[in-house]
Image: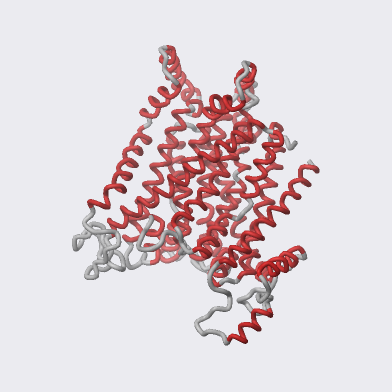
């Protein structure tokens, strides 16, 4: 186990290097720069500004300097927000995105597993059909259709919930719901499929023959095997939520990192873009690693050799 | 539960008798699919939509980029515009037909690409195992760890909005999940007796993968494909929402919906009609996929 973890963490280093290199040169290949504005800066001012941020050096030297900074945990200053470093920006805005993402992921898994297991246990009944149809519906409606509709219904028409910003706990409900709905749908589908297969297997028949209660069979024996494919879904789920947060943060006016990323990319705020990409890459790497470890713990057949 | 197991039991018995008369696995699957009303209805709906997307633009009274400047924002069923017009006076029906075509094209092409690469990669890694598996899956992990949506956004920022680039980017990330699912399935399949038997009679690795592993993978693969096509179409629409999707005046369902959402209060039909069409399209894919899975793998019925 220890050797496995060590080797994985060693692989993470070239991965991150690849991420940084690709995004660095891609960002630089984009036309325009951070100091373009309607009013053209006088050439000498522009030269000074560029020199201040080290942008006057050859591109490869800038790349090495940036890498050097990253190794020391320094993501550099923002080029657009004068007094802030990229680390400051991440510290300010990431917790919001994290809270949103984690809450919707937890709600998605909790409701998804429960509904999926329920559908599998009542297979081919009216309940099963309505749950599967609802799940398909949940997958098919884009986030940016649900978000305006939820705003229209609960905010504008009924006036029950706030529709923008994140002032109190209640203002989290609509954005979290928007992000969680497709997750509930996907998780319940995966759970149902896994559960149905498991319920037909021999050891469940044995458990039934022993006279175990249905609840015990499901909780102790079936569910554990059925949610195995779900663990592998953790990585894509996170990616899905990150993608969704780009949309949701924009619609609900949430001051999160996703909203920041898009505007920074358009404004050519090189360091902020790179910082956000690195942060999310680290996040995804760690989550995938965690998924593998959990999978191995649950299923000895997938032992970590 | 007992009632549910009895009914397919008798059906299975008749299926067995048919098999005795020399019916293949796929004949059986076809028969079971035809019995699934949702799936068959969806096949017709989807068939209709595909035909509409292909020949519709030639039959529609307006072109998708024609600006009817005298009829801006007219609601459906007025001034010769069956579904109304948008803020530039473009006919919604014509734009729907062309947008549907673009979305279907993106969904299918990206999925097929991901399918072929993913199955080959995953089955090989899972079957051969050892250092080859290690190497191949490490590669998948590395690509997987790239925050994909950010790269697509960076690509769009760098090279401008580009149709082909979007295909490449979306297809590029989808095959990774496919490869992982297939590898996991292969790893547990290869420990089964029939694979051992195949090895015992001296079949080569490639033949075992092609003849015995891949056909047994189809169930999970089909389920994944049903999740992939909507996923691709949705990804494209997220990009459109962020202003990085298909470029005007060309359109896709996602672009139409995101344009409609901004004018929701003034012209609700511009949001509602494309949304309905998108949901219908995606649900049809899903029902067909579900029907296929039930047909191929009767165990899950």
Residue B240, given in percent of the width and then of the height, sits at 44, 60
Of residues A112 and A42, the one nearer the viewer is: A42
Q: Quadrant of residue A91?
A: bottom right
Q: Quadrant of residue B18?
A: top left
Residue B96, given in percent of the width and then of the height, sits at 32, 55
Q: Quadrant of residue A124?
A: top left
Q: Is residue B129 left or right of residue A100?
A: right
The color scheme shown is secondary structure
- The residue drawn where x is 48% and y is 55% is B166
**Number of numbered discs visible in the structure rendering:** 0
Q: Residue furthest front?
A: A58
Above or below for B102 versus B210: below
- The residue drawn where x is 54% and y is 49% is B172
Of residues B122 and A30, the one nearer the viewer is: A30
Q: Residue furthest left?
A: B79
- The residue drawn where x is 49% and y is 44% is B228
Q: Is residue A211 visible?
A: no
Q: Residue furthest right?
A: A2
Q: Is residue A124 left or right of residue A173?
A: left
Above or below for B259 versus A2: below
Of residues A188 and B103, the one nearer the viewer is: B103
Residue A237, given in percent of the width and then of the height, sits at 58, 49
Q: Is residue A152 visible?
A: yes
Residue A257, given in percent of the width and then of the height, sits at 60, 65
């Amino acid at each position: 186990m220890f050797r496995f973890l060590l080797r994985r963490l060693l692989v993470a280093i070239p991965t991150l290097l690849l991420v940084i290199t690709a995004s660095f040169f891609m960002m630089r290949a984009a036309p325009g720069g951070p100091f373009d504005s309607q009013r053209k800066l006088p050439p000498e001012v522009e030269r000074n500004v560029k020199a201040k941020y080290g942008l006057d050096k050859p591109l490869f030297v800038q790349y090495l300097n940036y890498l050097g900074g990253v190794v020391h945990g320094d993501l550099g200053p923002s080029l657009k927000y004068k007094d802030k470093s990229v680390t400051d920006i991440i510290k300010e805005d990431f917790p919001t995105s994290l809270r949103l993402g984690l809450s919707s992921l937890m709600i998605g898994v909790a409701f998804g597993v429960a509904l999926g297991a329920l559908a599998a246990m009542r297979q081919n009944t009216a309940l099963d059909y309505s749950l599967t149809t609802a799940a398909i519906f949940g997958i098919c409606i884009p986030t940016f259709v649900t978000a305006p509709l939820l705003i229209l219904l609960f905010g504008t028409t009924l006036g029950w919930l706030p529709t923008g910003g994140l002032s109190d706990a209640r203002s989290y409900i609509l954005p979290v719901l928007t992000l969680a709905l497709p997750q509930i749908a996907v998780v319940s589908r995966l759970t149902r499929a896994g559960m149905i297969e498991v319920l037909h297997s021999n050891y469940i028949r044995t458990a039934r023959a022993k006279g175990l209660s249905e609840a015990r069979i499901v909780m102790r024996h079936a569910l554990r095997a059925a949610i195995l494919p779900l663990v592998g879904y953790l990585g894509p789920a996170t990616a899905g939520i990150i993608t969704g947060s780009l949309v949701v943060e924009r619609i609900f006016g949430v001051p999160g990192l996703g909203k920041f990323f898009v505007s920074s990319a358009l404004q050519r705020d090189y360091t902020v873009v790179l910082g956000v990409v690195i942060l999310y890459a680290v996040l995804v790497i760690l989550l995938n690693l965690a998924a593998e470890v959990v999978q191995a713990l649950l299923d000895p057949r997938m032992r970590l050799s | 539960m007992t009632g549910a197991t009895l009914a397919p039991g008798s059906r299975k018995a008749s299926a067995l008798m048919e098999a005795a008369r020399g019916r293949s696995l796929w004949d059986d699957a076809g028969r079971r699919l035809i019995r699934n009303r949702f799936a068959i209805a969806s096949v017709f709906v989807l068939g209709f939509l595909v035909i509409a997307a292909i020949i519709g633009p030639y039959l529609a009274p307006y072109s998708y980029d024609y600006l009817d400047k005298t009829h801006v924002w007219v609601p459906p069923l007025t001034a010769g515009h069956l579904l109304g017009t948008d803020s530039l006076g473009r006919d919604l029906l014509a734009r729907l037909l062309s947008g549907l075509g673009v979305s279907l094209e993106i969904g299918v092409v990206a999925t097929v690409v991901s399918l072929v690469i993913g199955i080959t990669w995953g089955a090989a890694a899972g079957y051969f195992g050892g250092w080859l598996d290690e190497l191949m899956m490490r590669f998948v992990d590395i690509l997987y760890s790239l925050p994909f949506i950010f790269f697509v956004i960076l690509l769009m920022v760098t090279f401008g909005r580009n149709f082909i680039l979007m295909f490449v980017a979306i297809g590029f990330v989808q095959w990774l999940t496919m490869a992982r699912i297939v590898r996991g399935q292969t790893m547990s399949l290869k420990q089964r007796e029939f694979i051992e038997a195949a090895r015992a009679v001296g079949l080569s690795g490639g033949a075992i993968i092609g003849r015995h592993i891949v056909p047994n993978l189809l169930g999970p693969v089909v389920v994944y494909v049903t999740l992939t096509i909507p996923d691709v179409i949705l990804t494209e629409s997220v990009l459109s929402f962020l202003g990085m999707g298909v470029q005007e005046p060309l359109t896709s369902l996602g672009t139409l919906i995101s344009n409609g959402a901004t004018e929701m209060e003034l012209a609700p039909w511009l949001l509602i009609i494309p949304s309905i069409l998108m949901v219908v399209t995606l649900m049809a894919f899903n029902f067909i996929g579900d029907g296929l899975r039930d047909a191929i793998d009767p165990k899950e019925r």
